[in-house]
Amino acid sequence: MSAKSNAPIIIKKKKVIAGDGHHGGAWKVAYADFVTAMMAFFLLMWLLNATTEKQRKGIADYFNPTIPVNRISGGGEGAFGGDSVFTEETLAQNGTGASTSDSVKSKSSPSLESLEEDSAKAADSKSFAEVQELLTAFGGESMAADKAMRHIVTRVTDEGLIIEVFDTEDEPLFAPRTTEPEDVAILLTEMMGRVLSVVKNQIAVTGHVRTEPLVVIDNPVWDLSNQRADKMREMLESSGTSPSRIQRVTGYADRKSAARNPMDVRNNRIEIILLRSDFKKN
């Protein structure tokens, strides 16, 4: 009994191997990844061949997280922006992404009215630039012309090109409180008659005068501004401007001062406006 109790205890450990070589499962994961990649590749090649440019743009937009799906990429809400890649050939072209539909053409192609408007704006810009260049060129013709150019400034507005002719301290355009033009006004009118003949824009003439002192009982500013504007119209017509081009003659009295001081002589001025081609719509 004692001999058995002194016998050594032997523990045997058995190592269990789940599988070796081809019996493992790791290769299956790699093979599945390879098959998935090949399927994605062939799907990509098929899509490139079977879709239009706009549908491909829709697919690209759909998978791009930085921008929303392009509103003109397809005709529906799916990844292809339509019912299928063959939608354009099998269904009516009423989607926003149909490349041959009238709806897309109306959105992407400029209308005839828009083209005409752009053409008119370009023509006006060219005419205004030409007039400004010709007026600048007059400054070097003679001493008198160079001196007369001190009375002219031009600016382009939404209404058209404004040629502003104004009094200076030492040389007024008209005799004080009358419509009798001074020599400088006659010279300027002749110069502008030659310049205005190179363009076909319609013309508006506006008259402005400075504010009279409050002691004046019969304030002449309204009548004087109207009469001077009309006198300028007559002088332009005498210089070769067609009467049919004059569309408006207006007097603003002293209501729109050019200088901060309403009694400054700079406010005595005539504005000759080359109207834009679409002025009748305004």
Image (spheres, rainbow, N blue to C red):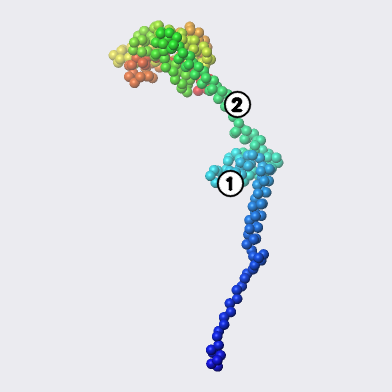
Q: Residue at x 60, y 28 (%)?
A: 111
In the image, residue 201 above or below residue 3: above
Which residue occupies the foreground of this view, 206 or 126? Answer: 126
| Circle 2 SS class | helix
| Real-space CA distance between mark 1 and mark 2, rounded to the nearest whole angstrom | 37 Å
| Circle 1 SS class | loop
Q: Give the x, y percent position of residue 29.
A: 63, 59
Q: Residue 87 bears which disc, if any?
A: none
Name the mark nearer the viewer: 1 or 2.
1
In the image, residue 38 above or below residue 154: below
Which residue occupies the foreground of this view, 20 or 173? Answer: 20
Query: Relative to residue 261, is residue 142 drawn left or right?
Result: right
Amino acid type of the residue that numbered disc 1 sits on in the rendered structure: Phe
In the image, residue 34 above or below residue 5: above
Residue wearing tag 2: 112
Q: Give the x, y percent position of residue 231.
A: 43, 9
Q: Residue at x 55, y 93 (%)?
A: 1
Q: Give the x, y percent position of residue 279.
A: 51, 20
Residue wearing tag 1: 63
Q: Residue at x 32, y 14 (%)?
A: 212
Amino acid type of the residue that numbered disc 2 sits on in the rendered structure: Leu
Q: Give the x, y percent position of residue 36.
A: 65, 54
